[in-house]
C-alpha cells in the first residue's frame, strides 16, 4: 500500500512539477506587488485543481465516449508537453508578448501558470491513467485525488515563497532552472510518447490476434 502511494506521489510530483513552476511564476510576476502575485498564485492553483479534478472524474469517460484510446491521449499529451519544454529551453527570458500578457493578471493565472505549467498535458494524462476505472477502486481514486491536491498546495507554498527564492537564486538562476527543468520535461514528454506508441501497437496486435482466432 505504501509503495503504491509513494509511486503515485512521485508520478504526480513529476508531472505537476512544483519546483519547475517556480521560475515560470517568477518570470511572469516580476515587478508586480506581493498581494497581486499571491492572488495570481491562488487563482492559478484553484484553476489547476478544477482542471485536474475534471480529468480525474470525467477524463476516461469522455475518452471512451469518443472512442479515443488512452495511448492516443498519451501520445498527444506528450507532444504538447514536448513543445512546451522546447519553449522553456530555447525561448527568450521575457518575450514581448509575455510581458504584455503579464499586465493582465486574470489571464496570467490561467495561461501559462495554470495551463500548461501546473495542469500540464502530462498531469492531465497522469490523473486519467492513475484513476483508470478498470484497474482502481473508487477509494484508490479518492486517495489519488488527495495526493494530487496536496502537491498543488505544496506548489502554492512555493509560489508564496517565490520572493525568497528569487533573492536566493536571482533572475539568472531562475532562467537556468527553467531551462534545466525544460530539459527534464522534454525527457518525460518523449518517454510518454514512446510509451503511448508502444501501448497503441501492443493493443492493436492483440486485437488483430483475437480477430484471427
Image (cartoon, rainbow, N blue to C red):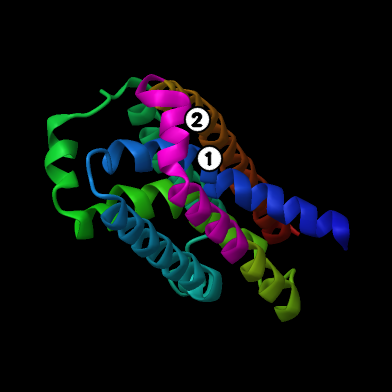
The question of residue 151 being in magenta is answered with: yes
Kindly indicate whether the residue at mark 1 contacts the one at mark 2 (C-beta within 8 angstroms). yes
The question of residue 144 being in magenta is answered with: no
Q: Which residues are magenta?
A: 148-172
Which of discs 2 and 1 lies nearer the camera? The answer is 1
> Which quadrant of the figure contains the C terminus?
bottom right
Residue in front for this viewpoint, 194 or 78: 78
Q: How many marks?
A: 2
Residue in front for this viewpoint, 172 or 33: 33
Q: Where on the picture, by quarter, is residue 83?
A: top left
Residue at the spot of label 2: 181
Q: Residue at x 50, y 75 (%)?
A: 58
Q: Residue at x 44, y 22 (%)?
A: 173
Question: Around disc 1, counting alpha carbons within 10 Å, would you say few (fewer than 14), some (14 to 19), or many (20 or more)?
Answer: some
Q: Is residue 137 above or below residue 158?
A: below
Residue in front for this viewpoint, 132 or 39: 39
Q: Is residue 63 left or right of residue 111?
A: right
Q: Earlier in the sequence, mark 2 or mark 1?
A: 1
Q: Position of residue 204 (x, y in %)?
A: 62, 51
Q: CA distance from mark 2 to mark 1?
A: 9 Å
Q: Position of residue 145 (x, y in %)?
A: 62, 69
Question: Residue 19's mark?
Answer: 1
> Which quadrant of the figure contains the N terminus?
bottom right
Amino acid at each position: 500500500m505504501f509503495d503504491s502511494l509513494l509511486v503515485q506521489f512521485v508520478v504526480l510530483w513529476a508531472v505537476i512539477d512544483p519546483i519547475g513552476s517556480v521560475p515560470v511564476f517568477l518570470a511572469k510576476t516580476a515587478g508586480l506587488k506581493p498581494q497581486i502575485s499571491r492572488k495570481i498564485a491562488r487563482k492559478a492553483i484553484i484553476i489547476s485543481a478544477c482542471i485536474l479534478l475534471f480529468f480525474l472524474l470525467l477524463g476516461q469517460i469522455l475518452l471512451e465516449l469518443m472512442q479515443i484510446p488512452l495511448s492516443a491521449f498519451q501520445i498527444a499529451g506528450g507532444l504538447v508537453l514536448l513543445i512546451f519544454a522546447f519553449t522553456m529551453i530555447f525561448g527568450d527570458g521575457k518575450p514581448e508578448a509575455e510581458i504584455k500578457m503579464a499586465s493582465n493578471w486574470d489571464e496570467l493565472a490561467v495561461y501559462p501558470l495554470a495551463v500548461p505549467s501546473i495542469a500540464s498535458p502530462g498531469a492531465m494524462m497522469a490523473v486519467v491513467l492513475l484513476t483508470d476505472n478498470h484497474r482502481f477502486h473508487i477509494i484508490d481514486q479518492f486517495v489519488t485525488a488527495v495526493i494530487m491536491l496536496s502537491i498543488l498546495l505544496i506548489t502554492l507554498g512555493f509560489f508564496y515563497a517565490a520572493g525568497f527564492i528569487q533573492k536566493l537564486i536571482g533572475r539568472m538562476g531562475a532562467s537556468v532552472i527553467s531551462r534545466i527543468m525544460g530539459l527534464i520535461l522534454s525527457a518525460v514528454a518523449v518517454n510518454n510518447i514512446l510509451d503511448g506508441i508502444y501501448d497503441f501497437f501492443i493493443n492493436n496486435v492483440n486485437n488483430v490476434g483475437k480477430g484471427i482466432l
